[in-house]
Amino acid sequence: MKKIVSVLLSAAIVMSLTGCTSKEETTKKKTKKTKKTEDTEDTEDPTEDPTEDPTEDPTEDPTSDTSDETSGTIPADSSDSSDTSDSSSPDLAPSHTLVFDDTLEDLGLYYPDEYWDWTVYHQDGEEEVNFKFSRIDDLYVTDPDKYGYLQSTIDDYQIDNQEATFNAFDADSQTFLSDAKSGKSVENSYYEFSTALFRADTQVFSYAITESSLLNEGQIMTFNIISDTGEYIWQRDVVTDPDGLASYVEALLSTSGASDEYNTWVSDVVTSIKHEELSFVMTYDAIVLLTTSWNRCGYQTYKIPVIGHEEIFNMNYFGKTPAEYTLYGDNNGDLTWDFDGDGNLDTLHVEGEYQDGTGLVLTIDYNGKSITRNDAESSYFSMMYYMVMKTRTGCYLYVHEMGEDGYEGTDVYMLDGDIFSYYVGCFWGNFRTLGFISPIAFELERDFDALGSGWFVNEFYVDYDGMPVRGYQMWNGYGNPVTTKVDIPAKLADEYTYDPTDDYTIPANTNLRVAFYDRETHEMVVQTLNEDSADDTYVVLDFNIDDDWNITVNGTSIYDLFYGIQFWG
């Protein structure tokens, strides 16, 4: 059982959490969002009867004990490696020719749905509020009639991991409440079942399970699936020269002065490639290796580009994209692709260096032509990563940077002729994944002060000018729960719109959390948190923050109304 415990829900821990906060019940009822700006629809016809079982069954028990994270691909390929027949699809017979094709369609799954549950305890008169919570991802295709095989394959491991994580949280919650009520010391903790998408189109569905109560410490499970048939894609389907890939990866990942732990990981990866047991996910231009880490997303990615090494790979899996898509630079800041659609490969290199008195100096080199940008007033001190977003209106470079006190923001540039020279603007916030990001729909999280500090999430899409546009009026919130000190007059929230309706009084000693918040208007919806989540209620508060940063509900300071208020910094 993977369990992370903390005395306080510090900023570091909150940053590792990902979720559009939603109501968690035993039946896993989903939280509703408001006023979605854009819907997508998949129009491809089904090719097989989705009611039948997938054509290939898993061969490894996901509960088996394995501590080697490089062998975390589940299920394992148990077929005879001497069998060179293609098990995937007739049109994916090995080819070493790169062909660009933008005729794929998105499956309409851009990130997982998330289910949350909370267990909260407050001792009357004490300022501290103790809690546990679980966050459980759910992946489901938007059209199961067309992709029933794919959904069945996903469910093979999804359901077991979801149930194991929820059951672990439920059992620990009972102990937590029993200990707290008997006067024993308790600690805050959380349980996660987390997934990361890397491709979700009509050719390939690729994702990883990065957190689960069924995973051993340091283990990540990776899955690559043919979208039409639900068949697993093995290393032997994607890699035509294992020894060549082993040499390529070893040279690419080797770093002077690296730790013994890192060098051991690289050695294990090379060995797994030679044994055709590599754990990887797929993007449009690369395979990607994952390792566990304590960064915000909980995992680290290492991109292995296929362009320039076509002789190693079956290139039928690469080069194809939807009309709008995103590509990442590799770990050296390089990216090769046909950005302008002229049929020729373009090269992009982006790097950032902090200089005293100058700030972050950013160099963007496109096909040998460079621009340098620096801003002495900028608080950024390091470039974290970059991505290129291709939309119907242009090609945009998103450079994600880190600033003081963990502040993260993104500069946006547009491909203007033969260089990414046109500076569009900047925005602040964290991308919630290191994996698949579609310009059509992606999530950003930002920290706001409300009933204490907390993280808030919203869906965005890239507008015609390259800048992200918010998809919902209100942000989904998650942060520390609080407990009411007194009765608080409020309004019930409409079940669908969350607009205020009837008068309602929140009783004293009620546990609650911020569910939705509009930072511009200060409109706030809170969710009461009861031992039986079926009794939870959504309520609209008369919340306000004035110019002097006095935070009130009904004109009264939140410190006079709530226990457990915590601000960061």
Image: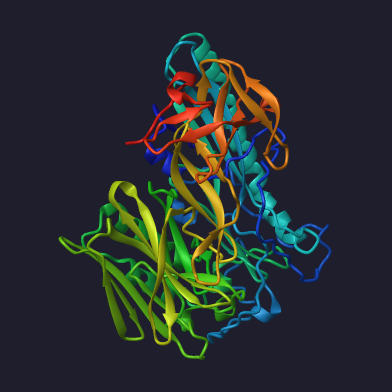
Q: How many dots with numbers?
A: 0
In the image, residue 417 above or below residue 22: below
Q: Position of residue 315 (x, y in %)?
A: 55, 80
Q: What colour scheme has been applied to the protein in the rendered image?
A: rainbow
Quarter of the image where the C terminus is located: top left
Whether residue 402 can be seen here: yes
Q: Position of residue 84 (x, y in %)?
A: 61, 76
Instruction: Please identify the quarter of the rendering in which residue 111 is found.
Output: bottom right
Instruction: Please identify the quarter of the rendering in which residue 85 is found.
Output: bottom right
* Outermost residue to the top: 182
Residue 250 relative to residue 4: left or right:
left
In the image, residue 24 above or below residue 312: above
Residue plotted at (69% across, 32% down):
26
Whether residue 1 can be seen here: no
In the image, residue 437 above or below residue 569: below
Q: Position of residue 516 (x, y in %)?
A: 58, 40
Q: Position of residue 537 (x, y in %)?
A: 67, 28
Q: Nearer the viewer, residue 173 or 461?
A: 461
Residue plotted at (53% across, 47% down):
457
In the image, residue 485 above or below residue 71: above
Q: Nearer the viewer, residue 298 or 340?
A: 340
Residue plotted at (40% across, 87% down):
418
Q: Nearer the viewer, residue 3 or 420?
A: 420
Q: Nearer the viewer, residue 162 or 35?
A: 35
